[in-house]
Image (cartoon, rainbow, N blue to C red):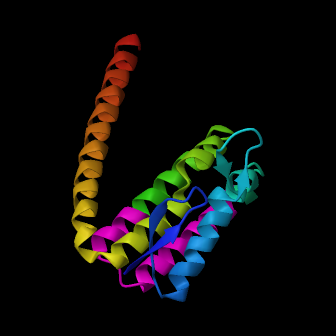
Amino acid sequence: MTDATGDADGSESVRLAVSDPDINRLLDVGRLLDDSIRIPGTSYRVGVEPLIGLLPVVGDAAGVAFSAYVLAVTVRSGAPRATVARVACILWIDAIVGTIPVVGDLFDAYWKANLRSARLLETRLADPASAAADRRYLRRLVAAVAGLSLVVTALLAAGAWWLARAI
């Protein structure tokens, strides 16, 4: 389900046509949260979520609430399980890094988790066969988390050993 639309420069781009109003609303919310404000003098855009995130505690809670909505729509849409898991991972990364003051807000402006998730869902619903990419993504993510866990465990063990020797 695609249709060609003409861009301002005269070129044609392919836009997915998803008839589900929830998905269209999700795309609109994603654009508002992650891509609604153009930074003057640049072509880069940010949304209201990084700005809301500047408010301590309340901003992070609002970001998690928006993410819960994105995840709920993803689950309700009937997307493949691998896609639901990938969207959950994208939102989880956003929530974890977003808790770091200032750095998390800059990350929100770059990562654009809501819009990224909405576009991923739109793509998977238009072409369910592409969900194999989500399974590969999740395998790499699990391997990275396992590797990171080993490194953290080794550092903790080395720190405990060093502390034991110092005592």
Picture coordinates of residue 5 (x, y %)? Answer: 51, 71
Q: Is residue 35 above or below residue 147?
A: below
> Which secondary structure is most common in the magenta stretch?
helix
- Is the N terminus in the top left, top right, bottom left or bottom right quadrant? bottom left
Toward which corner of the image does residue 151 lie, by quadrant? Answer: top left
- Is the C terminus in the top left, top right, bottom left or bottom right quadrant? top left
Picture coordinates of residue 96 (x, y %)? Answer: 52, 50
Q: Which residues are magenta?
A: 60-87
125 or 72, nearer to the observer: 125
Q: Is residue 122 above or below residue 53?
A: below
Toward which corner of the image does residue 44 lie, by quadrant? Answer: top right
Residue ID at (56%, 72%): 27
In this rendering, the count of numbered labels is 0
Q: Is residue 155 left or right of residue 107?
A: left
Residue 56 part of the magenta-drawn span: no
Residue ID at (47%, 63%): 12
Q: Is residue 11 left or right of residue 43?
A: left
1 or 5, nearer to the observer: 5
Visible residue check, residue 108:
yes
Residue 75 part of the magenta-drawn span: yes
Picture coordinates of residue 162 (x, y %)? Answer: 36, 16
Q: Is residue 128 above or below residue 149?
A: below
153 or 142, nearer to the observer: 142
66 or 153, nearer to the observer: 66
Visible residue check, residue 57:
no
Residue at the top extreme of this rendering? 166
Picture coordinates of residue 98 (x, y %)? Answer: 59, 49
Q: Is residue 154 above or below residue 130?
A: above
Residue ID at (31%, 45%): 145
Residue at the front extreme of this rendering? 10
Toward which corner of the image does residue 75 lie, by quadrant? Answer: bottom left
